[in-house]
């Protein structure tokens, strides 16, 4: 068995901020599509760089929560959250826990 | 529609947004609006704030002087139609609010660690709340078939008491139509629907299977309410025939009715930098915590 090459793709979220905030679901949706395309490549990992910004729960949910609902909790293992403030980190943890729980419940029956 | 404004002495952002939305509705139905006898001071102010788009003013003083660009000091009543406008509109409104605060140093250097200035810390909770309110207003209405629904927003800082007031008014389907059939809605009334919408994780489309276009966690409104509370303020919410604030719930007077949702956010400016978003989210059960990779 050969080693799988791990490819890191970085998405800089501060390029999509108004001031220091990324806020709307509409802004997150195309980034999620970019994320899904990147993750479709075998072995790829994606770095979401939140340096210098805050994100609303809606933005994080559209970017990451919807991904969990579509692909399951394992997808989170291939995403690296970089440069998160305590607030952003808490929002990501909330969204991830909530949507993983929902995914598991939806697929339990 | 003939409006006798002779007894009108004050309009806050909530009132201005409601007026603009009401006038728009009348014009949309091929009606006309004439406002009579508005006092000179209020007339100039409301014209400056763009409340009277397409409205005929009768016996009211015209706006004096030249209109200046004051984007750093106020934001006129603004109508949004597109979801793609949300982020920019929320940013413009908060920038205008911060610009209204005379003690702010607009040339302040950002903190080296966070990259934030004091103005940024002041503006961010309002910008966050506005994003969530506008998101709710523009997405729920369209899902319910109100494809032409739009939102009016306005804001003002009152230096005399240190209060910030923001009005966000939509002409969409309202909470009751959005939540009809939801298990959290125990009575089919507008007041019950407002109270249900204030509970965390209550949303018409929390489950992907319910409506497939998008999802919603149902925590945007509750987080917004907590932002207002942490900043020493509150939300007032009107929808259908009901109005709710955290100190009182009631039906609108004299059979008044609002088709859509109208929200007034009030908070103390000096408390805004104390808001920490991480303290506002619903708790996550420890057993649900997920291992994530932070760098």
Image (cartoon, coloured by chain):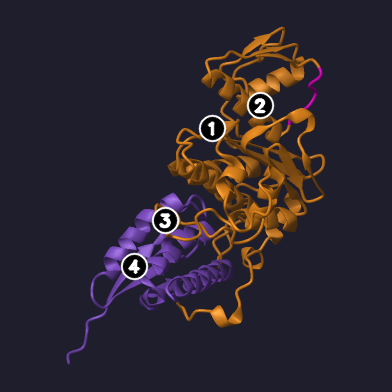
Helix, strand or loop at label 1? It is strand
The picture places residue A107, in percent across and down from the top left corner, at 42, 73
In the image, residue B146 sits, relative to residue B54, either above or below, namely below
- CA distance for labels 4 and 3: 15 Å
- CA distance for labels 3 and 2: 33 Å
Are tags 3 and 1 found on a single chain?
A: no
The residue where tag 2 is placed is B19
Q: How many marks?
A: 4
- CA distance for labels 2 and 4: 46 Å
Mark 2 Cα shell of 10 Å, populated few (<14), some (14-19), many (≥20):
some
Numbered disc in front, either 2 or 4: 2
The residue where tag 3 is placed is A28
Q: At x 65% / y 14%, what residue is drawn? A: B1
Q: Is residue B198 left or right of residue A102?
A: right
Q: Nearer the viewer, residue B240 or B275?
A: B240
User: Chain letter of disc 1?
Assistant: B
Query: Marks 3 and 1: CB-CB under 8 Å?
Result: no
Q: Residue furthest top?
A: B59
The residue where tag 4 is placed is A10
Query: Marks 4 and 1: CB-CB under 8 Å?
Result: no
Are tags 4 and 1 found on a single chain?
A: no
Helix, strand or loop at label 2? It is helix
The residue where tag 1 is placed is B79
- CA distance for labels 2 and 1: 12 Å
């Amino acid at each position: 068995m050969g080693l799988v090459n791990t490819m890191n793709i970085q998405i800089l979220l501060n390029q999509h901020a108004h001031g220091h905030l990324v806020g709307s679901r509409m802004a997150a949706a195309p980034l999620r599509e970019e994320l899904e395309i990147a993750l479709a490549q075998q072995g790829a990992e994606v770095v979401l760089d939140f340096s210098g910004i805050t994100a609303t729960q809606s933005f994080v949910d559209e970017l990451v929560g919807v991904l969990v609902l579509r692909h399951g909790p394992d997808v989170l293992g291939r995403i690296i959250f970089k440069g998160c403030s305590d607030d952003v980190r808490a929002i990501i943890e909330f969204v991830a826990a909530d949507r993983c729980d929902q995914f598991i419940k939806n697929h339990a029956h | 529609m003939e409006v006798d404004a002779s007894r009108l002495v004050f309009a806050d952002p909530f009132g201005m947004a409601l007026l603009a939305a009401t006038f728009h509705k009348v014009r949309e139905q091929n009606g006309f609006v004439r406002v009579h006898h508005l006092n000179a001071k209020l007339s100039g102010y409301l014209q400056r704030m763009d409340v009277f788009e397409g409205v005929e003013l009768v016996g009211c003083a015209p706006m004096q002087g030249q209109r200046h660009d004051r984007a750093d000091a106020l934001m006129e009543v603004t109508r949004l139609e597109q979801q793609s406008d949300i982020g920019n509109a929320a940013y413009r409104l908060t920038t205008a609010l911060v610009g209204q605060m005379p003690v702010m140093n607009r040339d302040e250097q950002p903190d080296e660690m966070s990259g934030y200035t004091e103005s940024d810390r002041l503006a961010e909770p309002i910008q966050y709340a506005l994003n969530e309110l506008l998101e709710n207003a523009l997405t729920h209405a369209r899902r319910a078939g109100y494809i032409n629904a739009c939102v009016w927003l306005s804001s003002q800082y009152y230096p005399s008491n240190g209060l910030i007031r923001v009005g966000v008014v939509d002409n969409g389907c309202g909470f009751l139509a959005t939540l009809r059939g939801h298990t959290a809605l125990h009575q089919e009334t507008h007041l019950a629907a407002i109270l249900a919408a204030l509970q965390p994780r209550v949303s018409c489309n929390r489950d992907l299977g319910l409506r497939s276009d998008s999802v919603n966690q149902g925590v945007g409104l509750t987080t917004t309410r907590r932002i207002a509370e942490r900043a020493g303020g509150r939300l007032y919410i009107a929808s259908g025939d009901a109005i709710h604030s955290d100190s009182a719930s009631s039906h609108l007077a004299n059979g008044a009715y609002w088709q859509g949702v109208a929200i007034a956010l009030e908070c103390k400016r000096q408390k805004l930098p104390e808001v920490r978003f991480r303290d506002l989210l619903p708790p996550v059960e420890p057993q649900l915590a997920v291992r994530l990779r932070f760098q």
